[in-house]
Image (spheres, coloured by chain):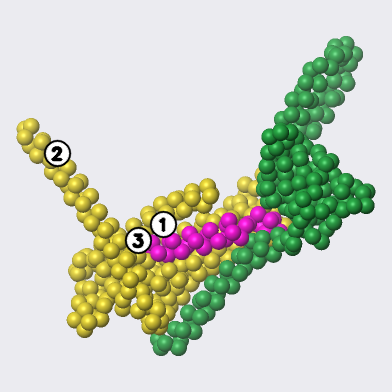
Chain colours: A green, B yellow
Amino acid sequence: MDRIKIDLWVGIFVALGVAALLGLAMKVGNLTSSKLGDTYKVTAAFENIGGLKPNAPVKSAGVLVGRVANIGFDSKAYEAVVTIKIDKRYAFPKDTFANIYTAGLLGEQYVGLEAGGDEDILQEGDKITQTQDAVVLEKMISQFLYNKASEPNTDSKPSDEKADNASAAKSTELGDAPF
Amino acid sequence: MIKSALNGLVGLLSGIGHRMIARTWRLGAGARLFFLTLMYSGESFRRFHLTLREVYFTGVMSLLIIIVSAFFVGMVLALQGYNTLQKYGSSEAIGVLVALALVRELGPVVTALLFAGRAGTAITAEIGLMKTTEQLSAMEMMAVNPIARVVAPRFWAGVIAMPILAALFSMVGILGGYLVAVPLIGVDDGAFWSQMQANVDVKDDVINGVIKSLVFGVACTMIALFEGFDAPPTAEGVSHATTRTVVISSLTVLALDFVLTSFMLVV
């Protein structure tokens, strides 16, 4: 095996390796999809952020417009202070509404922005005043159970048995729904 | 009676002690060889064709086994993943499963295991035979440092080849998984790639996989080199050394993988 042939093969080998790495970065990884340009930061206070994490997506109308930069705790108001960075290409009015949503039933949580009607736009360092907390599933379930328990027990009459059966059938139908 | 029992016990204890001392000595000698290799590495970069030659023998010649096994590993991952995921109605997540499993774990680890079997044994046997046929002593007689001339180029070749092979393994494995998932099973093409891109992080997953394979490259090559360099100059000695290369490399790779993963997940 002469030296030129070996050099050629090693060159091909290294080129293949670089191509594989590039493929992993571009096609498999998120190098191309998660680029934000220049950003500005705004804060929003929530009473409960649920499972929101730094670097979670910030979406408006379903489009990724920014990311959560960091999450702090305000020990005076006992609130979570979420700093989000928004791409400079997107301007939002001052009275934008910030919600914490869950992607799917059990997916990751993200911040959703809904634009208001104000003429002024959010600047670097501004605070979003209108916020809605994350929905905590346990809280909802316990509330639901509490309401159920406190309902007056009206369906003890024998004539209501049919309706009762029907509702039971309905609930099992819901229970089997493929979430 | 009691005396013989005691003697047996003492023999057992001293046997364990001897073994421990021998193992510790080998560890120290291996570390010394590692530092000597690093020290004399300048030579292998100044005469780079020596290193390139070894890259050819360890890397290029391993391409076939790496690519074929990566293809099958990817296809099996997709089949098994689909089998479980479809029960939860999320068969689109199959791309994420295949990509994360390959990039984080299977790519670096399986490549290192195959590398130890394919290239590590060759290195050990070659250097062991060089020692047996007194080629290394002959080099020293000619004032050529065998570590600079024989060990260092092979070491750097292994360190260069391993990340390239691991990256190829991951990429080919993902293509194999794609082939099973999309044309064969009928998972949606766009969902396969987009879910993968949404969940594979370049820094956390791809770069960490490369770091892992670099560490495995250093470990596997160094073990193979040391076993060859330390082999008793007999036919039996070389064969034992070759066996030990595979056993020790495999165990080291698996143990190191656990340690590295725990560091990467915590930080």
Instruction: Tell me the residue at 71%/62% (across/down).
Output: A35
- Report which quarter residue B31 is drawn in: bottom left
C-alpha distance separating marks 3 and 2: 33 Å
Residues under labels 1 and 3: Cα distance?
A: 10 Å
Task: Name which residue type carries label 3.
Answer: Val
Same chain check for tags 1 and 3: yes
**Image quadrant where one finds the C terminus of chain A:** top right
Question: Which residue carries the number 1 mark?
Answer: B253
Residue interval drawn in magenta: B194-220
Q: Chain of mark 3?
A: B
Q: Which residue is mark 2?
A: B9
Q: For mark 3, what is the residue? A: B246
Please report, as a chain letter, where disc 2 is located: B
Q: Earlier in the sequence, mark 2 or mark 1?
A: 2
Image coordinates of residue B52 in percent, x first then y, are 42, 79
- Identify which residue, B194 or A88, lies in the foreground: A88
Q: Chain of mark 1?
A: B
The amino acid sitting under disc 1 is Val
Instruction: Give the left or right position of residue A42, taking residue A4 as reference.
Output: right
**Residues under numbered marks 2 and 1 in contact, where contact means CB atoms less than 8 Å apart:** no
Compute the Cα span from label 2 to label 1.
35 Å
- Name the residue located 35 percent from the left edge and 65 percent from the top edge: B222
Amino acid at dot 2: Leu
Q: What residue is at 40 percent from the left and 64 percent from the top?
A: B218
